[in-house]
Amino acid sequence: MKMTDQTQNNETDRKRRILVIDDNHDAADTLSMMLKLKGNNVETQYDGYQGIAAAERFLPDIVVLDIGMPGLDGYQTCQLIRGTEWGKTIRIFALTGYGQPNDFQKSTDVGFDAHLLKPVDLVELLRLIEQKD
């Protein structure tokens, strides 16, 4: 059976389950709103502990995670998610102000799939989101 163009578009445009975790409420809420406007199912949390609990319940396709959070930072949050059975296949993107070469290396080392700098380049983020799972 041949896929129609409409079927192919539906697969490309499929709704993603995205969890945004950032202690900056305004930044998290704004990003979440933009991702929802693009047709995604989005949940927002404001610290690492809440983010991990939400990820376990929500089982997102993608987590957009700030690194510089008080308490449980983004590196620790990523490692804890990766350490679970359900978190091994989630795509996790760092979205941070940390932009030194060692920051990029550390994010790779702890399990992030991408490292984006604030302010977010929405085109780049959407490109990453749309990549094949």
Image: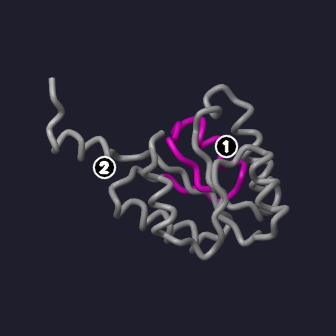
From the top left corner, tell me how far across and down residue 107 is, in percent. Answer: 76, 53
- Distance between the Cα atoms at labels 1 and 2? 27 Å
Q: x and y percent of residue 17 in the render?
A: 45, 45
Looking at the picture, which amino acid does disc 1 mark? Ile
Relative to 6, 67 lies left or right:
right
Residue topped by disc 1: 52
Q: Residue at x 78, y 45 (%)?
A: 110
Q: Secondary structure at mark 1?
A: helix
**Which mark is on residue 13?**
2
- Expressed as whole percent of the image width and height from the top left, the position of residue 79 reads 77, 42
Q: Could you tell me if the residues under marks 1 and 2 are in contact, i.e. CB atoms within 8 Å?
A: no
**First reached walking from the N terminus: tag 1 or tag 2:** 2
Q: Residue at x 16, y 44 (%)?
A: 6
Instruction: Looking at the picture, tell me which residue is in the foreground, 81 or 56.
Output: 81
* Numbered circle sitting on residue 74: none
Instruction: Let me know if residue 55 is in the magenta part.
Output: yes
Q: Quadrant of residue 100?
A: bottom right
- Residue 19 magenta: no
* Residue 23 position (above or below residue 114): below
Residue visible at 60% across and 76% down in the picture = 119
Q: Which residues make up the magenta segment?
A: 43-64
Q: Given this view, does label 1 or label 2 mark the residue nearer the observer? A: 2
Amino acid at circle 2: Asp
- Mark 2 lies on a secondary structure that is loop
